[in-house]
Image (spheres, rainbow, N blue to C red):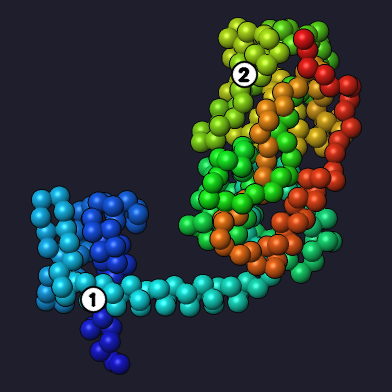
């Protein structure tokens, strides 16, 4: 065993070889592994040099495993699958009560954080890990149990889902802004105010022209105002009196209830989309993940915020 480190090929090269053999294509293997095609080719060449045998037959824009390559690929695939399964089992045992939830920064900070004390009270044995990103993570490949997505279930055919909250969008400002600039008398008057725009870099989000059009107002005449690419910062700017912004009710309901934000019109847009908890189809959830899933959906059903005024779309 003392010479095993020198006899065995590099683990990294074996991973590259497994992907290249499975795809029978270096370019596809490179895309899967996040490498360049040249790096894949170099890793395979290094492995062949160490073993002293050709593993692939190379033709113009095509590769195929040699007979020796096929036998070796079968053994490498089996060995790597055993190692992966063992690592997953060890990780699962080490995090017996741990659940990872992938969500946007806005959902994590504005929906989850105010409720964490209730989560700790209701599920005291659960270790919840919230993973945020500026894009929707592929929780299947990231080995994350639960995620939060906005849209419709048909948008995620490979995932099961459970409703948290419908998508309802309103216009809000701070008391200081209203005191300085006045309350808009109509949705149309909003186009003359300082509007704060969310420029979402990787997720589709309703913008001011779409929201105004839902009230039969030409949004192309709206003030550009301030543009920010992070929704948490958008709401922070509103509370600082910098302008009026669109508010997703499930995120800002508490701020409206406490008076930190005020709705500036009765108009609201109900898009028909909603925010859901999702998890990969065919992957059974652990018991802790089942408990967190139930808790999230119950919070979505049970908590509502009183309106400041009747909410009816303008004619």
Q: Is 148 above or below relative to 1?
A: above
- Quarter of the figure that contains the N terminus: bottom left
**Residue 154, image x, y percentages:** 58, 40
Labelled pair 1, 2 in contact (Cβ < 8 Å):
no
Residue sitting at x 81%, y 8%:
185
Q: Is residue 280 above or below residue 151?
A: below
Q: Which residue is mark 2?
A: 210
Give the left or right position of residue 303, taking residue 141 as reference.
right
Badge number at residue 94: none
Question: Which residue position holds label 1?
Answer: 72
SS for callout 1 = helix
Instruction: Single out the mark in the foreground, 1 or 2.
Output: 1
Front residue of this view, candidates 262 and 145: 145
Q: Is residue 34 left or right of residue 279?
A: left
Total marks in image: 2
Using a 10 Å C-alpha cutoff, classify the residue at mark 2 as few (fewer than 14 neighbours), some (14 to 19) or many (20 or more).
some
Residue 142 image position (x, y, % from top left): 50, 57
* Quadrant in the picture for the C terminus: top right
Q: Residue at x 67, y 41 (%)?
A: 275
| Real-space Cα separation, disc 1 to disc 2, in angstroms | 57 Å
> Image check: 15 left or right of 63?
right
Would residue 85 be seen by someone viewing this image from the given angle?
yes
Q: Is residue 245 above or below residue 72?
A: above
Locate residue 218, reporting x and y percent: 63, 8
Find numbered disc 2 in the image and state the secondary structure of the residue it sits on.
helix
Report the front residue among 250 and 184: 250
Dot 1 surroundings within 10 Å: few (below 14), some, or many (20 or more)? some
Q: Quadrant of residue 58?
A: bottom left
Q: Is residue 193 visible?
A: no
- The answer to which image quadrant residue 80 occupies is bottom left
């Amino acid at each position: 065993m003392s010479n095993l480190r020198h006899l065995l090929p590099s683990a990294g090269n074996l991973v590259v070889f497994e992907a290249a053999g499975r795809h029978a294509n270096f370019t596809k293997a490179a895309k899967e592994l996040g490498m360049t095609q040249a790096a894949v080719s170099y890793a395979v060449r290094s492995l062949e040099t160490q073993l002293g045998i050709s593993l692939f037959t190379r033709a113009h824009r095509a590769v195929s495993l040699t007979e020796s390559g096929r036998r070796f690929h079968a053994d490498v695939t089996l060995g790597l699958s055993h190692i992966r399964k063992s690592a997953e089992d060890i990780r699962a045992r080490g995090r017996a009560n741990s659940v990872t939830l992938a969500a946007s920064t806005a959902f994590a900070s504005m929906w989850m954080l105010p409720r964490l004390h209730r989560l700790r009270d209701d599920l005291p044995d659960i270790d919840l890990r919230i993973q945020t990103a500026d894009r929707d993570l592929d929780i299947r490949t990231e080995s994350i149990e639960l995620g939060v997505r906005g849209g419709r279930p048909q948008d995620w055919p490979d995932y099961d889902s459970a409703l948290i909250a419908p998508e309802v969008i309103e216009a809000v400002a701070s008391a200081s802004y209203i005191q300085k600039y006045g309350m808009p008398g109509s949705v149309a008057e909003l186009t003359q105010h300082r509007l704060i725009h969310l420029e979402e870099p990787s997720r589709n989000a309703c913008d001011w022209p779409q929201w105004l059009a839902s009230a039969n107002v030409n949004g192309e005449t709206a003030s550009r105002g301030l543009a920010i690419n992070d929704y948490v910062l958008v709401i922070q700017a509103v509370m600082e009196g910098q302008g009026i912004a669109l508010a997703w009710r499930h995120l800002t309901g508490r701020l409206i209830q406490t008076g930190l934000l005020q709705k500036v019109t009765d108009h609201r847009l109900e898009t028909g989309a909603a925010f859901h908890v999702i998890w990969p189809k065919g992957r059974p959830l652990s018991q802790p993940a089942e408990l967190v899933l139930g808790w999230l959906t119950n919070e979505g059903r049970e908590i509502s915020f009183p309106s400041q005024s009747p909410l009816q779309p303008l004619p």
